[in-house]
Amino acid sequence: MSQTSSAPAGAPSSPHHIVAFDPGDLALPEVEHLARALAHSLAGARDICTYPVSEPAPHDCAVIALDVAADVATLLRAVREALVAHGAAAAGVAVWSADTGAIHTSGDLADVAGAVNALVARRDQTGGRAILFPGQDDLRGVLPIRDMLARSAITAVDSLGIPVDPDTLVVTRDFVRPVYRDGRLVLALRPRADAMGCFEQPDPTPCCAMH
Amino acid sequence: MSAHHEPGHEHGHEHYHEDTVGNAIAADAAADLAIAESDLSPAERSRRSFLTRMGLLGIAAGVAGIATPFAGAATAKASSAAPARALALDAVSGPESADDVQWLAGDHHIHTQYSPDALYRVMQQVEHAKLHGIDWMVITDHGGVDHQKYSVDLTYPDILASRAAYPDMLIFHGLEWNIPSAEHGTVFVAPGAGERDVLKMFEGSYDGTVNGWGSSSASHESHALDGLLFLRDAVTNGAVDDALFLANHPARKGLDSPHEIRNWRDTAPEIAVGMEGAPGHQAAGIPAPFGTGAGRGFYDNSPSANSFAAYPLESYLTHGGFDWMTAKVGGLWDSLLAEGKGWWISANSDSHTIWRDTWANTGSYTGGKWGDPIDTLVSNAGFGDFAPGQYSRTVVGARRRNYASVMAAIRAGRVWVSHGELIRSLQVTASSSDDHGATLGGTLVVRQGRDVKVRIEIGLNSGLNANGDAPRLRRVDLIAGPVTGPTTIPVAGITTGPDANRDGFSAPGTSVVRQWDISATKGKVVLTHTFENVDGPFYFRVRGTDGNVGGTATANDPTPPRMDPLGNSNPWADLWFYANPVFVATR
């Protein structure tokens, strides 16, 4: 893997809280919609990630990192109420606090495992696909890798072994979805004819297309 | 394997023969217990007797260090409660000589108006195939509730009418199976009284979409295996004369995990015989406004919750038009071959809508069918597929020009594939002083310490392909690796359970062992190589390219194919051929 890192700007501070929920059997676009709605109702969202889990059947959990301190019990209740309001009553919820380092959960044991896994992956920056992150709005059009790293929370790119340098252009299509990996927020790239593109495309041949 | 040579470029040993060299092609019918002894030539009978004495056939296969690619089939049938019946009904009477093999170009992945996302009448696709030099073809519309309920019955008379109209074309009836817990796959059966009913029953009982078994899970995986056993039993019970399954676009979305592929193959090795080495939709990377400007093969997806998590991101791309499982030297395909079991590759059109064609749907997809298409006289550059044979070909060495022989050749792995008619013909043989020879898919048995001579005879294409280009073969690569038995390579995150050692997808011992630059532009090229003093079982395979573009060298491969760029991958400027392997067993 070829990774180009940004200049060390100091690790970003830890979020105050990380909130994760497991919505059960829900399609990814709906999970994303629910997570954005929940983040909107909670103040101070820094980033939102989705995280795939395989039990009881393959689906995605969501994780929201918060920069605002709150009472954990209040937060759990607020998350629960927001999910109920959006029709996801059975969701397992997990909340982590930087102050105590403890993970609190709400929901049946079977429902919270996915949420806890997603939360831990985001906390340790080992997994999670960011659908919202600092600087995302500045990653539009065609940009050199240098600018993508400077303008956003992305800390590295993975170009699949294809040689790139900070001036290599990336066609963003205004759709950038980096993933947490090995303590970094990594943007995977794929080759285009005269540039690189984001690995994840906004309009992949659909999951349920018959092709 | 003791191969006395250095990896990397080597030149020379390139001989030109303007005439056809009458070289015996030793198809490995002798090792195929599915072929009745009465169907074998005297030489093949003698060879089978030898193989049996050496314990290389049947349940003793593993003892010799290399299973014949067919040993599992024999074992499975022997343990079946149903009376044994020859699965591979080859010619009624056996060929006198393997020279009788004729190479037939085909395509096992073709859609029609009976798919919700396709267009043509069956007869039109047959005519397209005929135009492009195809000898055999499989109609594979998508499995689904409506397809199962209506389309199978509707397709069948169209297929019968096409067979009557084009008696020279071998037209199989099949479907594109939504494999439970996995990707799509071609399932097809031999023509006969039961072909329609078996397909319909299979689809109703085992299609992942019909039954809601699409997502990845162990229970859904078991339904896939049940489906393969159903097909096996349909053959052993005589409901159909033959049936085959090949996985389609296997790496596209990371859905076909290594253990699933191994389980398909090992559960019904006589049915589950291979995968698409190259997917269809090869026009999808033609840049806009001339084409869709998507990814070659429509390989533009990312990992999902249903994907096998250990697959690397590059597996989601095509490489020189080929699926990563095949294109990666020392990768998934090689990890299967290194177990000494056959698993063969094909290359097909997946033709739904043909690039720049002027035809369009009418009506709506109701009752399992679109209305008959009409010619709008307006070319559609948004179509991402080629017609059958226009770009991709699966060429099989059939003993007779008939349905049974084509299926037997696919099962035997007597198959090579090409894009853009890069070459006209290919004959690969391995021989030694104590075995007369083996070809693609076959097994050569030699005493330890013997030399194994490889002969690759390539008919160059001095004409034009379907794009009006004169394709030029510029390099041929010989790839080889030891047969090491069942994989024991662990995969991160999978350490326990029955699949712990069945999810390996690397064969570190396999590499490009020799390369030839080709300067000739017409006639035949004969390349030879000797594996000296062989000390253990191994396999080799061959690929070639026009050499226009390439990727970054790896430890196993000095000149890998390029990862196809999104938005602009001209398929006509990046041509490859791949051959299935030849195994060498030692005694």
Image (spheres, coloured by chain):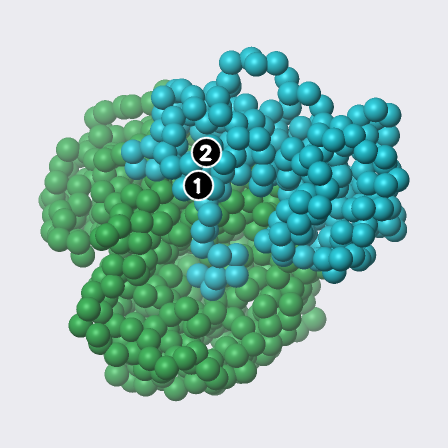
**In the image, what residue occupies the spot 76% across and 28% down?**
A16
Mark 2, residues whose alpha carbon is within 10 Å: few (<14), some, or many (≥20)?
A: many
10 Å crowding of disc 1: few (<14), some (14-19), many (20+):
some
Contact between labelled residues 2 and 1, with CB atoms less than 8 Å apart: yes
Q: What element carries label 2?
A: loop
Residue closest to the eye, A63 or B436? A63
Q: Quadrant of residue A100?
A: top right
Residue shown at the point (27%, 23%) measured from the top left: B10
Question: Which image quadrant for residue B180?
Answer: bottom right
Q: In the rendered image, which quarter is residue B107 located in?
A: bottom left
Report whether B311 appears left or right of B154. Answer: right
Q: Mark 1 points at which residue?
A: A174
From the viewer's perspective, is B236 left or right of A158?
right
Are the residues under badges 1 and 2 in a single subunit?
A: yes
Q: Which chain carries label 2?
A: A
Number of numbered tags placed on the structure image: 2
Instruction: From the image, state the color of chain B.
Output: green
What residue is shown with label 2?
Answer: A139
Real-space CA distance between mark 1 and mark 2, rounded to the nearest whole angstrom = 7 Å
Q: Whole-percent x and y of residue B349?
A: 34, 59
What residue is drawn where x is 64% and y is 43%? A50
Dot 1 or dot 2, earlier in sequence: 2
Which amino acid type corresponds to the residue marked 2 in the rendered image?
Answer: Leu
The percent position of residue A86, horizontal first and vertical second, equals 72, 57
Residue B453 shows in this picture? no
Horizontal and vertical percent position of residue B488: 65, 35
* Disc on res. A25: none
**Quick check: can you spot residue B175?**
yes
Q: What hue represents chain A?
A: cyan
Decide which of A69, A204 is in the foreground and name it. Answer: A69
The foreground one among B44 and B367 is B367
